[in-house]
Image (spheres, grey):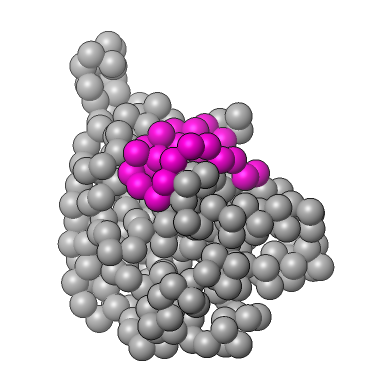
Amino acid sequence: MGVVRYTFYSEVLKEQTTITAIIPTCEPWRHTDGCKAFYDNYGKKKVLYLLHGGSDDCSLYLRRTRIEEYAYDHELIVICPEVRNSFYSNMLHGKQYFTYLTEELPRVAENLFPISRESEDRYVLGNSMGSHGAMKWALNCPSYFAAATGMSGAGDLEELGFYDKMPERIYNSFGTLEEYRGSYNDFKFLYRKHLEEGTKMPRLYTCCGQQDGFYEGAKKFATDAKESGVDILFEEGPGGHDWAFWDQWLPKMLDHMVKGV
């Protein structure tokens, strides 16, 4: 797999920003027909938008997991953006990261790299803060992805305890609890709206470690969504809020999303 670190000017953010892209390339020990044949038959690829957690950046998945190998196994291009501690939101006091994520980033990525533009070839996954970004993107743009996964933190912000644990960061991204309810950040509001209107949603997956502080809230959200009629699968296992858990579960979640297993 090839790795590209691409820095460009974002018109939405009004500043330089960086993405990490992982791209299928010829590897002689794997592509025995040779590199010429590999590139002569190089077509559009499925894409995974891989969203980092709080206080991280676009390099962390590459540094802390075997994402290159997982991407090779699933024939994926992987795009890792960088959004600081924004919760992938159009911040009340900050930049318009959700607009950047959902509008500008795909346009840039699809014009730079050989990415399929079919919804059945698009996936999004995130850990911790990135799990909120993944679910929010999928639920606000339900026809865009085939599937979405949130690891360790996908859920209702009040049930996860975010308003109690980090009120300043939460307010900057979401406003008050009253402002959060019924907004594009409110997952329960979004999926209930889609169910009422008969909107087809992508397949949703979540997982959380049983020793994770967000475990109860993440499980409750998935249970409530499933009982309401959402196509969502929640899985759990030993582990905390750390890279050991995420690297273990990342290939399992990719199998669910891409292979349907």
Q: Quadrant of residue 128?
A: bottom left
The quarter of the image holding the N terminus is: top left
Name the residue: 48% across, 81% down: 174
Q: Establish if 81 lies above or below 114.
A: below
**Which range of residues does the magenta coloring cover?**
233-258
Residue 35 magenta-drawn? no
| SS majority, magenta | helix
Q: Where is residue 44 in the image (x, y as percent from the top left)?
A: 41, 40
Q: Position of residue 129 (x, y in %)?
A: 41, 62
Give 9 or 247, whichever is nearer the viewer: 247
Residue 131 shown left or right of residue 24 in the figure: right
Q: Quadrant of residue 141?
A: bottom right
Name the residue: 34% across, 56% down: 52
Q: Establish if 157 lies above or below 204.
A: below
Name the residue: 31% across, 59% down: 81
Residue 174 shown left or right of residue 38 in the figure: right
Q: Position of residue 252 (x, y in %)?
A: 49, 33
Name the residue: 33% across, 84% down: 94
The quarter of the image holding the C terminus is: top right
